[in-house]
Amino acid sequence: MIVASLGLVLSGCSEEAPTPPPPRMVRTIVVEEKPLVLSAEGAGTIQARYVNNIGFLVSGRVLTRNVDVGASVKKGDLLASLDPVDYNSRLTAAQSQVTSAQAALDQAAGEESRFKQLLANGFTPQARYDQALKDLQTAQAGVVGAKANLKLAQDQLGYTKLHAPTEGVVTQTGANVGQVVQAGEMVVQLSSFNDRDGVFSISVIYIAAAKVGMPVKVWMQAKPNVSVQGVVREISPNADPVTGTYTVKVTLTDPPADMFIGAVVVGEVSTAGREVVTVPSSAILQTGDTPQVWLVSADDTVKRVPVKVDRFNTDTVTISSGIAKGDRIVTAGVNALNDGQKVTVEKADAQ
């Protein structure tokens, strides 16, 4: 028994106290506050900045219309014409008036010259010469008036042909062949192709954030690789009574040819908001109703800190309060830690 007791004592002395586990290796980041980028997208169409409603300067019956909707025209191209019969008759009448007035002027000039000579020789009274001079001046005025009427008739005959004042694309027609139109009535609507805008309908939720001069990225819906930069030029002060949206016009900088008038485009605008903290979604510990993160203290121990999440994204979480710039938080293995546990920092990245 003595020998057995001695053996037990010796074996008890040989057992050592358990070794505590080493500090757990964790991956961390040092958070930074950055502006929250707010972005929004919307679909719209390409429209011409300048739209001209072109019509004849005189009235008449449309004889020809040489363009249809979608046609591209250059400056000076013939768009339409009126029946010129009446205006040719007016031109002929005006030409005859000029001939008659010129004949009257020639006769009055001869009379004035003859009576002037007679007056100088004393063979006619002053009153008779004054009458001849008056007739000459009247004839001169008649020639001026007849020539003015001739010029008007020539211009009106020229107005029966409607030419494009600028190059552009026909976006609407207002008269067909055989139709009688009045002076100034729209016959062809011509949209300038050089200056184009992206026109978007913006919801009331986002219109308050829209500002004139705000940069916008615009790309074609059918060809996302075709993109261009633009600037907000105009914001409608009133909402559309049917859709309840506001019209926003974006001036495009050197738009490519693919962005033709009527093309469907997508616009994206991004603005910097308030300062927030963004962390990887793997850093969030959700054990109850309140999300938490593991905060690494200066002595390399961890503690749970509740945070307020502003937004969940695919790989990141935006935190509005709970942690601040310079805090170090754990980003991996958050479910295997305990409060006060000692850790070893594997890597510290700036997020």
Image (tube, rainbow, N blue to C red):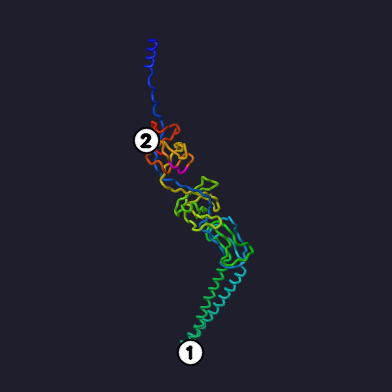
State the image coordinates of residue 242 (x, y, percent, origin top left). Answer: 56, 56
Could you say which is closer to the camera, residue 222 or residue 323?
323
Residue at 43 percent across and 37 percent down: it is 293
Compute the Cα span from label 2 to label 1: 128 Å
In the figure, residue 324 lies in which quadrant?
top left
Residue at 39 percent across and 25 percent down: it is 20
Asked if residue 8 lies left or right of residue 185, the reply is: left
Q: Give the residues in magenta.
A: 307-311
Residue at 37 percent across and 35 percent down: it is 297
Q: Amino acid at mark 2?
A: Ser
State the image coordinates of residue 294 (x, y, percent, origin top left). Answer: 41, 36
Identify the secondary structure beneath mark 1: loop
> Is the residue marked by circle 1 packed among few (<14), some (14-19), or many (20+) residues within 10 Å?
few
The disc placed on residue 297 is 2
Q: In the rendered image, which residue does mark 1 sit on?
A: 125
Q: Amino acid at mark 1?
A: Pro
Q: Is residue 279 magenta?
A: no
